Image: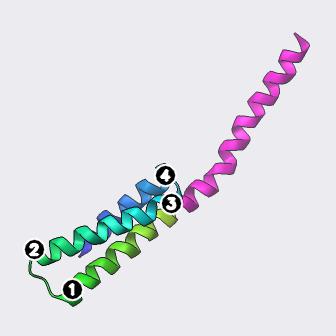
Amino acid sequence: MTTLAICCTLFGMALGVRLRFFVLLPVLFLGTLLIVVLSFAEQLGFGQALSNIAVFAGCLQLGYLISALVRHMAGPAVVIERKEPLAVRRSVDRRV
């Protein structure tokens, strides 16, 4: 269960860095199907399968939220650093 939580959180963080919000629903659906299949293959009970699905969904969304917040907080700093050199370049280009 701990391995599932760690892997899902890291996978959610990777999704949050690279992709938009709309990717979560298909990933949640496919992951839920995979967990159901694996739970039946391992002959786990219904309650244990539901707890695995809950951990998967919660940790995936938590990882996505963490990386989205970090990207949001770091975004303005990156944009400010990019705009200043462009403004300097434009003023230099106008003089030439």
Residue 87 located within the stretch drawn in magenta: yes
Residue at x 90% of width, y 14% of height: 95
> What secondary structure prevails in the magenta region?
helix
Q: Label 4 is placed on what type of residue?
A: Leu
The mark that comes first in sequence, 4 or 2, is 4
Helix, strand, or loop for circle 3?
A: helix
Looking at the image, is mark 1 or mark 4 earlier in the sequence? 4
Q: Is residue 45 above or below residue 89?
A: below
Disc on the earlier residue, 3 or 1: 3
Percent coordinates x, y for residue 45 in the rendering? 15, 88
Q: Secondary structure at mark 2?
A: helix
Residues at marks 3 and 1, CA–CA distance in whole angstroms:
28 Å
Question: Mark 2 vs mark 1: which is more N-terminal?
Answer: 2
Task: Measure the C-alpha gap from mark 4 to mark 2.
Answer: 31 Å
Which amino acid type is marked by label 2? Ala
Q: CA distance from mark 4 to mark 3?
A: 8 Å
Q: Position of residue 17 (x, y in %)?
A: 49, 52
Front-most of residues 93 and 40: 40
Image quarter in which the N terminus is found = bottom left
Identify the residue position indicated by label 1 in the image: 48
Q: As displayed, is residue 84 above or below residue 8?
A: above
Q: Which residue is mark 4?
A: 19
**Residue plotted at (13% across, 83% down):** 44
Where are the magenta residues, as a range? 67-96
Quadrant location of the C terminus in the rendered image: top right
Magenta run includes residue 54 = no
Q: How many marks?
A: 4
Mark 2 vs mark 1, foreground winner is: 2
Q: Secondary structure at mark 4?
A: loop
